[in-house]
Image (cartoon, rainbow, N blue to C red):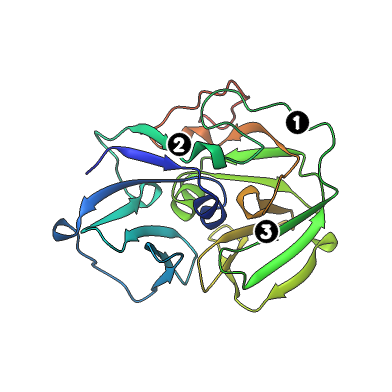
Amino acid sequence: MREIVACHCGQCRRWSGHVWASTSVPLDRFRLTAEAALRWFASSAAARRGFCTRCGSSLFWRPADEDRIAIATGALDATDGLRLTRHIHTGDAGDYYRPEGPPPPPARDGPRVLDCACLCGGVAFRLPGPAGPVTACHCRQCRRLSGHYAASFDAGEATIDWLRRDTLGEYATPAGGRRGFCTRCGSSLWFRSAAGEFSVEAGAVTGPTGGRMAEHIFVGSKGAYYEIDDGLPQAGRG
C-alpha cells in the first residue's frame, strides 16, 4: 500500500469532520468482502466517496480516471510499515489548526454565527459562534468513523437552528452515545454522549470557526502511523 497522505481540502474536511488520511492500492489488488451498507456519493466529476450508511464511517475515495482506490487509514485494523508522509491542500486547512506544528492563535473577532452543513447540503444548521476550544479525539471509534482522528467543539444542542435535516441519520454507539451524519454523502456532523453532552465536528463549519485546537484525548489509542507534534496537552495515555 502507498504511504499515507493527509488531505486538508474543504471536501475531505467536511466529509470526515476534520482531516481525512488515506493509503491507496491498485483496483486489481482490492476486494470488497462486505458491501450491504456501502454507499457511493459523487462529490465531484472527478471522484466518488464511499461510506457506511449505517454508522457514517468515511471509507473510500475513488478517482474516476485512475485504476486505484484510496482507503481511509482509520478503517484499517493495522497500519504496520505505513507512515504519514505528506499533507496536501494545506491552504484549505481549517482556521483552528495547522497541518503540522502549533495551531494559530485564535482570531481576535470570531464569527458570531457558525454555518454548518454536510457535503451534499441535505443537512444544514446554524449555532452561535465562535467555536472556542476544539478537542482532538484519537479513540478507536473516532478514528474509524472519521478515517483519521476527530476534532470537535462543545455546543448547546438547544441553541442549534436547523435549516435542513432531510438526510440526517444517527448511529447509536456501544457506549450509549449517538453520532449524527448525512445518509446521502456520509459527512460527519455531531456527537451526543450518553449523558447528553453535545459537540459539533469542526469540519462541519463551512467558514471560519473562530476556534483553536486545545487538547488531544485518548492518545493511548492513536494510530501508529502519525505523531502528535503541536505541543498541546495530551490525555488518556493508558
Residue depicted at 56% across the width and 42% down the height: 92
Q: Which residue lies furthest to the top in this view?
A: 231
Residue depicted at 56% across the width and 32% down the height: 236
- Residue bearing the label numbered 1: 106
| Quadrant of res 81 | top left
Sort mark 3 into few (<14), some (14-19) or many (20+) by Cα contacts within 10 Å.
Answer: few
Helix or strand or loop: what does disc 1 sit on?
A: loop
* Residue 194: mark in rendering: 3
- Which badge, 2 or 3, comes first in the chain's sequence? 3
* Amino acid type, label 1: Pro
* Residue 228: mark in rendering: none
Residue depicted at 44% across the width and 58% down the height: 58
Q: Position of residue 218 (x, y in %)?
A: 54, 37
Q: Nearer the viewer, mark 3 or mark 1?
A: 1
- Residue bearing the label numbered 2: 222
Sort mark 1 into few (<14), some (14-19) or many (20+) by Cα contacts within 10 Å.
Answer: some
